[in-house]
Image (cartoon, rainbow, N blue to C red):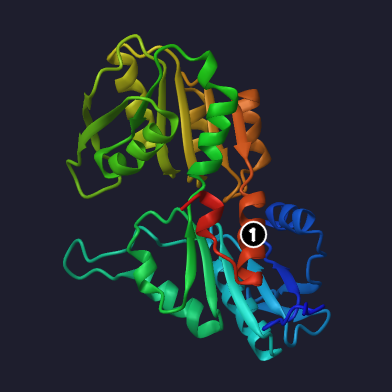
Amino acid sequence: MSHTHEIKAYGDIVLFPGTASPELAQKIADYLKKDLCGRDVILFPNDNLFIKLHASVRGQDVYVIQTTSRPVHQNLMELLISLQTLRLDSAARITAVLPYLCYSRSDKKDQPRVPITSRLVTDMIEVAGADRYMTLDPHAGQVQGFFSIPGDVLTASHTIVEYIQENLLGKLTAPVVMAVDLGFAKKARNYAADLDLPVAFVEKRRVANDSNAEALNVIGDIDGCDVIIVDDEVDTGGSIAQAINLAKEKGARDIYLAFIHPVFSADAAQKLAVLDIKEIITTDTVPIPKESKALFGDRLQICSIAPMLSEVILRAHEGRSVGELFDE
């Protein structure tokens, strides 16, 4: 005997867009054929935020899509206030969808008298009302352990690998994947394995307590090879600039750059734009300002994570495996 209706633990999917990543939220809505939840987000003259829903979300399965890139504190507070607004309106389940999670580098006490801010941020997200979370490629894997609520920690590397396979591999000469530093060695090896390519690493040693580090050597042979430099995020662009100059010194041919989060602090975009890079491949976890896009021209390729996030949202809603999506 077949049941004609599914038993739903939660109501329908409701997509609540934060103001930090409106284009990504719209793409997810288009993919899932849903409207975005109507809301007012008002920044008062005293810099206080106010949020009001246009309609009730009582009993619904709500996904708050908000990246926490710059302005970090405004975007983070907006996320927290959004979560609390939905909680107080009796949403059945609230998932914080965080394409880019701020403070994920502050993940340990690596010096005396310093905070573990990443843990503070995850606590605030829970206290504000999130039942679950989704995020992509946090800088440190242990951030998952800071959440007590269940979540999906995803990687956009599949999306980037797919793009490289379809658009680049056939055109490259003796391609090699190169990690920007040894901290990214394991993930670079995964890229290399997925692309069936050899791997090289930049070995660098930090010489001071600031964000500048000194690149020293390349482990692996890149002489006469096209090099795909991989990293999780580009912040100031310093490490990337060093890696590119080093690769050129060691005889690399064309250089391609692939990374997940285009954070682009300060003048990072300007710094990258003048480097000898054939193509820059990244994602839309962090929106890139028009001015920065213009600097790169057609060398910039943004692979959208919207289809992947949409599928994960759908599977979470229906209670199906997310791992299957990535053959895991």
Which residue occupies 44% across, 11% down? 173
In terms of image quadrants, where is residue 190?
Answer: top left
Which residue occupies 78% across, 71% down? 37
In the image, residue 234 sits, relative to residue 77, either above or below, namely above
Question: Left or right: where does residue 126 sit relative to residue 187?
Answer: right
Helix, strand or loop under label 1: loop
Q: Residue furthest front?
A: 1
Which residue occupies 65% across, 37% down? 291
In terms of image quadrants, where is residue 207?
Answer: top left
Q: Position of residue 328 (x, y in %)?
A: 46, 53
In the image, residue 278 sits, relative to residue 140, either above or below, namely above
Question: Residue beneath label 1, please?
Answer: 20
* Amino acid type, mark 1: Ala
Q: Residues within 10 Å of mark 1 (few under 14, many from 20)?
A: many
Question: Left or right: where does residue 204 sit relative to residue 253?
Answer: left
Q: Position of residue 104 (x, y in %)?
A: 39, 60
Name the foreground residue: 5 vs 306.
5
Quadrant where the image shows the N terminus: bottom right
Which residue occupies 52% across, 47% down? 156
